[in-house]
Image (spheres, rainbow, N blue to C red):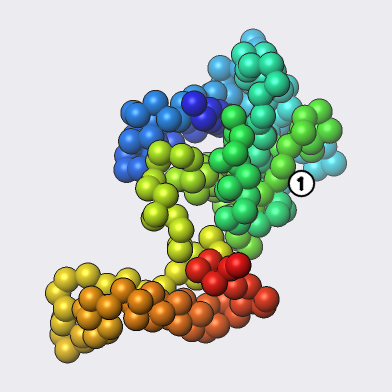
Amino acid sequence: MFSVDLVTLFPELFAPFVGLSILGRAVEGGLVDVRYHHLLDYLGSSERADDSPFGGGPGMVLRIEPIARALDAIVAGAAVGERRLIIVPSAAGKPFDQSDAARCAALDRVVFVCGHYEGIDERLGSLYDVQEYSLGDFVLTGGEIAALAFLDATVRLLPGVVSAASLTDESFTGGWLDYPSYTRPAAFRGIEVPAVLLSGDHSAIAKWRREESRRRTARRRADLLQGALHPQEKP
């Protein structure tokens, strides 16, 4: 079973999403185990979860002690030799992409440490092997939304969560963006579905999809086309 630990001040933000859709079915089906670690539960008497930054300045910084206690408890309860990764969502981190999701899906456990306010005490990275990932070039009030996105991208790649056929030609799997999709009705407000998709000619449909995938990628993300073959064209 794939294990996920969420270290956060706001576990209630995760619960509705984790209980719904594909992620919810994965949890119900015993493929994924999601556990919440509320930072307030790791505070000592009269301690705070955050404090003002040394050197002055606006905002508050999450303190290292409660986070360390939470991580120590997670590691202590893990199996010997477990393959795991501790992720800190951060605007200063590496942009999270499909290859990172695949890397996470190949592990036994992923731990998300969600910062808030002005971030987390920098000593976290000196004490634990952590990887900072960014959701994009913008700043969020906390790491929870980014962690949810990383979690969703990872879980859907686990065996048995989504059909293997659904993952074959999707965006970024082979370097290109996915081809356009259509469904009923065949015509709507004067716009018709491309005739080839209604032809029943599977060879022609496959060719059209490859061409549309390349065209869409060239128009929206030309950087992805450099030397990249479509998955169906790879030797």
- Up the image or down, 38 lies above or below 222; here it is above
Q: Residue at x 81, y 28 (%)?
A: 127
Around disc 1, counting alpha carbons within 10 Å, would you say few (fewer than 14), some (14 to 19), or many (20 or more)?
few
Q: Residue at x 57, y 48 (%)?
A: 101
Front-most of residues 79 and 198: 198
Q: Assign the C terminus to one quadrant of the image.
A: bottom right
| Residue 43 seen in the figure | no
Question: Which residue is denoted by mark 1 in the rendering?
Answer: 57
Front-most of residues 179 and 6: 179
Residue 98 in the image, given as x and y percentages of width and height: 57, 55
Q: Residue at x 52, y 84 (%)?
A: 219
Q: Residue at x 63, y 45 (%)?
A: 103
Residue 192 in the image, given as x and y percentages of width and height: 21, 85
Regarding mark 1 in the picture, which secondary structure is present there? loop
Residue lying furthest bottom: 190
Residue 152 in the image, given as x and y percentages of width and height: 47, 45
Q: Is residue 154 left or right of residue 22?
A: right
Inspect the image, locate mark 1, and give the three-letter code of the amino acid beneath it. Answer: Gly
- Up the image or down, 161 lies above or below 68; here it is below
* Residue 116 found in image quarter: top right
Q: How many marks?
A: 1
- Up the image or down, 74 lies above or below 87; here it is above
Q: Is residue 3 left or right of residue 42?
A: left
Residue 96 in the image, given as x and y percentages of width and height: 62, 54
* Residue 30 found in image quarter: top left
